[in-house]
Amino acid sequence: MQVNIHYLGRGTVMKNPYQLLDGVRIIELTTYVAAPSAGRILGDWGAEIIKVEAIPKGDTTRFAVPLPGMIPMTYDVHNANKKSIALDIKKPSGAEIMRKLLSTADVFLTNTRKPALQKLGLDYETLSEKYPRLIHAHMTGFGEAGKMANDSGFDNVCYWALGGAMIASMEKDTAPLIPPSAFGDNSTASTMAAAICAALLKQKNTEEGSKIVVSLYGQAVYNMLEPLLSIQCSDQDKYPKSRLENTPLSNTYQCKDGKWVMVSCHEYERYFPRFMEIIGREDLSINPEYNSFSAGNKRSKEIVEILSNGFAKFNRDELCKLLNQKDIPHSIICNVYDLLKSEQAIDNQYLVEFVQPNGQKFIESATPAKFGGVTVAPRNRAPFLGEQTTKILKELNYSDNEIESLFNQNVIMEKHVHAHVKE
């Protein structure tokens, strides 16, 4: 897969359009996915991201994997376009380094829980007094209020389970679905990145900082807005749903080759005749027991079965051609394996190949915003643990002797080898 990382305009090479946040420094004290993903987005957009990692192992995603034998990859994706400094911020000299870093920063991004932040002196109340212009961006599981505010939680717990999506998305009379990993993390990260950009504009105009709190649970509640409104507006919308009880024109159908399509039409009386033409049941288009929105809702199970039988006569590609001819909104239903080969994703550079330090090649999803056309942001590999420690300390005016002493006291660490390779 070829990736174009040059930017053309009127026949000449333009300045990189992703240098939107050039000059912005973000200090990141983050682990796992949601908060680091927000940093990755901002790094793609040109911000300088300095990730502070604990010693001796750093971010958990450097070594933790969901399945035995899996190649650790999460860190390398969500922490590209960043620098790493590894230090023990619980030691006085480590805490002093952290304070000096924050004095140079525009943003402090963290997902550390509030009690731990308070213990470290990194909570909003403490930092806002010391650094009034600093933006304090806190990613949490459940929000900052309520009995669950300080509970531990991941995407599947905070977003999918408590947020209602796990049951709302399941087929009725089956088990709650097993969600794809980090699905809620990445959407929540996008909200955090946008919030930080808004706060940066305020900071630029007023020299004032901001307090930002974005939670996985809050993102889930927001994403469930339409179902929440729907159950208040009608007693007919029930969750979980069965496809046999759902509107026939916004449903899933299996084709003769075993593959599936999704159709989604919200104007029943406009589109119903087009469906009937495809399956050769034009008689139903003029039958008042089927051709109105209310009738279709009343007979949803029957009509879904009629369409299921009609569509089952076609292979998926044949059906999609007919749906296109009738201008019916639809899509093939992809599995993850299909997505890796999606022409639409490749054509828009939503999928990007990258090379690991050991030469292995993988494909990642690009951060979704495109600037300057069908482009991708320049990508610097994720840093080794503490890879830029010495360089960053020198920028903070630490002498060689001071840096050596910090190494000897196990306050700092610096590696120049990939986490997957034994030194």
Image: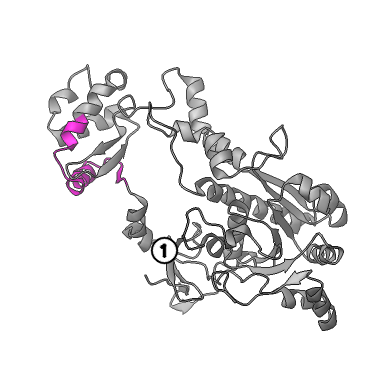
The vertical placement of 207 against 294, above or below, is: below
Residue 324 is inside the magenta segment: yes
Q: Position of residue 349 (x, y in %)?
A: 41, 63
Q: Position of residue 144 (x, y in %)?
A: 72, 39
Image-based side of 230 in relation to 338, left or right: right
Residue stretch in magenta:
307-333
Q: Which quadrant is the C terminus positioned in?
A: bottom right
Image-based side of 190 in relation to 115, left or right: left
The vertical placement of 274 against 359, above or below, is: above
Image-based side of 198 in relation to 239, left or right: right
What residue does disc 1 label? Answer: 349
Q: Position of residue 261 (x, y in %)?
A: 27, 42
In-front residue for pair 198/337: 337
The reply to whether residue 374 is in sight is no
The crowding category of the residue bearing disc 1, from other C-alpha atoms within 10 Å (few below 14, some 14 to 19, many at least 20), is many
Image-based side of 104 in relation to 33, left or right: right
At x 48%, y 56%, the residue is: 68
Q: Position of residue 226 (x, y in %)?
A: 49, 31
Residue sitting farthest toward the bottom:
400
Residue 336 is inside the magenta segment: no
At x 22%, y 41%, the residue is: 326
Q: How is the image coloured?
A: one colour
- Residue 255, quarter of picture: top left
At x 52%, y 67%, the residue is: 377
In-front residue for pair 80/14: 80
The reply to whether residue 112 is in sight is yes
Q: Secondary structure at mark 1?
A: loop
At x 56%, y 60%, the residue is: 78
Q: Amino acid at mark 1?
A: Gln
The vertical placement of 298 against 227, above or below, is: above
Q: Which quadrant is the N terminus positioned in?
A: bottom left
- Residue 307, quarter of picture: top left
